[in-house]
Amino acid sequence: MNLTAYIYLATLLFAIGALVVLLRRNTIIVFMGVELMLNACNLALITFARMHGSLDGQVYVLFVMVVAAAEVVVGLAIIMSIYRARRSASVDDANLLKL
Amino acid sequence: MSVLETSVGLALADPSAVRAVEATGTSALAWLLIALPLLGAALLLIGGRATDSFGPLLATLLSWGSFVVGALIVLQLSGLAEDERAMSVPLWDWVTAGDLSVHAGLLIDPLSMAFVLLITFVGSLIHVYSLGYMEHDPDKRRFFAYLNLFVAAMLILVLADSYLLLFVGWEGVGLASYLLIGFWNHNPAYASAANKAFVVNRIGDFALIIAMAYMLATFGGLDFATVHGSAGSASTTILTIIGLLLLLGACGKSAQFPLQSWLGDAMAGPTPVSALIHAATMVTAGVYLVVRSQAIFDLTPEARLAVAVVGAITLLYGAIVGCAKDDIKKALAASTMSQIGYMMLAAGLGPIGYAFAIFHLITHGFFKAGMFLGAGSVMHGMADRVDMRRFGGLSGMMKITWLTFMAGWLAILGVPPFAGFWSKDKIIESAFVDQGNGAWQAWVFGLVALIGAGITAFYMSRLFFMTFHGKARWEDDVDPHESPLTMTVPMIVLAVGSVALGFILSWRGTFASWLEPVTGHVEHHEPVLSVPVIMGLTLVLVIIGGAIAWLRYGRDEVPVVAPVGSFATRAARQDLFQDEFNENFLRRPGASLVAGLEVADDDVIDGGLVGGTSRGLAGVADVVRRAQNGFVRTYALTMLAGIVAILGAVWVIQ
């Protein structure tokens, strides 16, 4: 099977993730968009590793997975506390940090 | 070039610059000279009121202690061979920074010890005198603390073995002078006189600092041995610059033209201060500096000529101003200026004059201090009045003061065999010597010195006759009386010095040969006029000056209120408009410059550059801050746009 198909898939997934982040207001959904972009990157890295016959890409993927898991913990905690404080999960409602 | 070559020979033969062995015996204790009065100053200032009762006495004793140490060291020196009379007393490593290393150390040689004896002896006598003069002053203790501080600083100045340590003493005497001129600072005029002295001295000090910077850059060191030892290797231009800067420094401290304006006002201080600091010792520091730096001045005839010119101008200036002053202390101050002008002139003549400059300095230290103490005694008896037009006929009331003052008066006139005759006549003779740089110099300097002697005779006789002779002109509420013993004894001692010191020191050339290791041996030079002619002319001029003074101020009645007088008289009364000159040509332009710079600073630097930058940044920030709106998604879009832009750029470039 042609490896470029995986690249296209990864690009597509990344674009979907980015659009989700940019367009949706619900924090959880935005967060999922972020995760989707991370995994699109993972897919691209795996594919390139396969293409070049090198393990470097796969090592990066492992790192990304670990960091993503940690990030989820922190991110969800933040979302939870914002929700508790403001009774809303909309990213546009958390807009106080500005001049 | 022959002048230059002989000068080089002299510089290399200058033993003070080359060989100074480490001191042994009494000389190793030379630090005590400084430590004793310094201890006194510290005890009296830190001890505060607790030392009120015994402080003045303690300060006097410590000053005498310093004199005893000095005398012992001189005894030891005189027992040594001539070329072994330079000794160094290393104290500690002072500054070590990279290539620069300065050691604090003392240099004991005939020149510095001559000064030490003058300072400690006259200084101690004046301490004793002050015990009487300041008896009723509530701040007596503070006064003695400052006196001790002055003695210590002056000893640092003359004993230092490097320009840097000399500068410490230089500033120390400046500080002591400032504190003592403004001792009665509850009077605003006195306080501003102290400020004036301090500020004018700063100009000279600044020049001295620059001179030291040049030395450091040229010779890589500041100690006398390094600087004087390698002076011959420096270019003449650099040496001339250093010489002129040293001269400017000397002008500040010694009240020489053009920095002479502070000395008259410095008479605001108590009279013992005027006697010690502003007549006998501190104001002669400039002469010391020039003579000490002879290795530099020997190599630069231009700077030496400048020294002589400054001396000649000041000696006439002081003499002319002295003729018109009615304030007894200010007249004496003008005379001090004039006499230091003589010393400067002698120092500017080069090797033939150094020894005479120091000789006159020593005798002047005695007779001028004696006369100042006499003036103080008169003021003491006349309820602190200083206007000579209100004196007169005091010879009967104050016999001791009158006789001691007469000794000083005859000494400064140069009447043989009094002290001034031996020293001042030598300077006049040396001024007449043609040293191969044009006979006009010999004639100009010689005639200036000669005429100066005549004017000196006039104004000093005027002062003497106005104060002690003629009709009594004092007001009814004054009751002239002789001063107590503590005051008259120092005056008597100084009067004895004024009578005999010149003869003793020049007996078989004692003093000149004592200084020879430092000033070098000089063959006798023939003046352009023969010596007896010069002596005779001087005496004739002195007698004429004295006679005119007698006719006008001894025989004729002196008006109680000063007559308006001719333009010349009024000009001299105003110090030849020195203050007006300084005000209009130096202070006003300076103040305008400062005001202009202030405006420039406020409007251009602060307002335009600094303010403009901050206002511009604030405007830009006002626009840019709108981009931060708090919406996370806007940020994400910005980031995305940025990444796309960067990737696009990379793609285009590749």
Image (spheres, coloured by chain):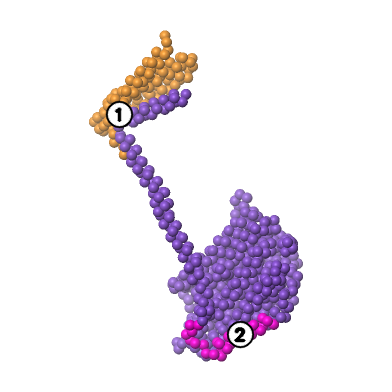
Amino acid type at mark 2? Gly
Q: Residue A79 carries which label?
A: 1
Q: Which residue corresponds to the image point at 27% horizontal and 26% vertical from the top-left?
A: A26
Q: For the point 31% across and 26% down, which residue is it?
A: A22
**Residue B645 location in percent, x, y?**
40, 27
Bounds of the magenta segment: B536-565
Q: Point out residue B9 in the picture as x, y percentages from the top left corner.
A: 74, 62
Q: Can you see residue B300?
A: yes
- Do the residues marked 2 and 1 share a common chain? no
Label 1 resides on the chain identified as A
* Residue B240, picture quadrant: bottom right
Q: Which chain's colour is orange?
A: A
Tell me if residue B123 can be seen. Answer: no
- For the point 50% across and 71% down, the residue is B579
Q: Nearer the viewer, residue B218 or B92?
A: B218
| Disc 1: CA contacts within 10 A as few (<14), some (14-19) or many (>=20) | some
Numbered mark located on residue B546 in the image: 2
B288 left or right of B41 in image: right
Residue B545, placed above or below residue A13? below
Question: Could you tell me what secondary structure mostly forms the magenta stretch?
Answer: helix
Image location of residue B309, percent across then percent down: 62, 69
Amino acid type, callout 1: Ile
